[in-house]
Image (cartoon, rainbow, N blue to C red):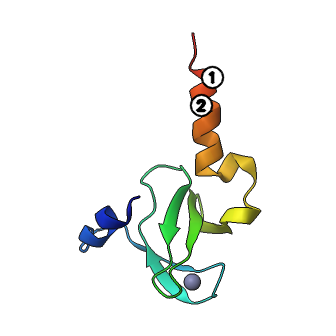
Amino acid sequence: MASSIQQSLHAAVLEENVICPYCHENTVILPAENYRPIFVECSVCGKQFIAERMKKGIQVLKVEGAPCCSDPDRRAIETGLGDED
Ligand SMILES: [Zn+2]
């Protein structure tokens, strides 16, 4: 759903080099500015994985192997449920 947006982010300043958890090749991603896990797409194999900014760098996780606190989808769902009055 975000693929069209990602293609236009060409000269971003916050790009980071990471190792793709699927193909283990170097790929460049654009992590969130805060410490929030996000989905990114490997430019080598095209698979989506989770990138989370940590104090010492970027942590990458396979989508199916992520703990729920690092899964952007699950976190969004939990937050949504908690928002009810
Ligand atoms: Zn890859």
Count of numbered tags: 2
The answer as to whether callout 1 falls within 8 Å of ligand 1 is: no
Q: Is residue 78 visible?
A: yes
Q: Residues within 10 Å of mark 1 (few under 14, many from 20)?
A: few
Task: Identify the residue at horizontal 59%, vertical 58% (top origin).
Answer: 55
Q: What's the residue at 49%, 67% (across, down)?
A: 40
Q: Residue 6 appears in which quarter of the rendering? A: bottom left
* Residue 79: mark in rendering: 2
Corner quadrant of residue 77: top right
Left or right: 35 in relation to 4 = right
Q: CA distance from mark 2 to mark 1?
A: 5 Å
The quadrant of the picture showing ligand 1 is bottom right
Query: Farthest top residue?
Result: 85
Q: Position of residue 21 (x, y in %)?
A: 66, 78
Nearest the eye: 44 or 1: 1
Q: Is residue 6 left or right of residue 64?
A: left
- Marks 2 and 1: CB-CB under 8 Å? yes
Q: In what element is the residue under mark 2?
A: helix
Q: Quadrant of the C terminus?
A: top right
The foreground one among 12 and 21 is 21
Q: Quadrant of the N terminus?
A: bottom left
Write the residue at 59% across / 63% down. Answer: 50
Q: Is residue 9 above or below residue 66?
A: below
The residue sitting at 53% across, 86% down in the picture is: 45
Label 1 sits on residue: 82
> Which mark identifies residue 32?
none
- Residue 57 shows in the view: no
How crowded pointer 2 is (Cα within 10 Å; few <14, some 14-19, many 20+) is rated as few
Which amino acid does the dot numbered 1 rest on?
Gly
Secondary structure under tag 1 reads helix
Q: Amino acid at mark 2?
A: Thr
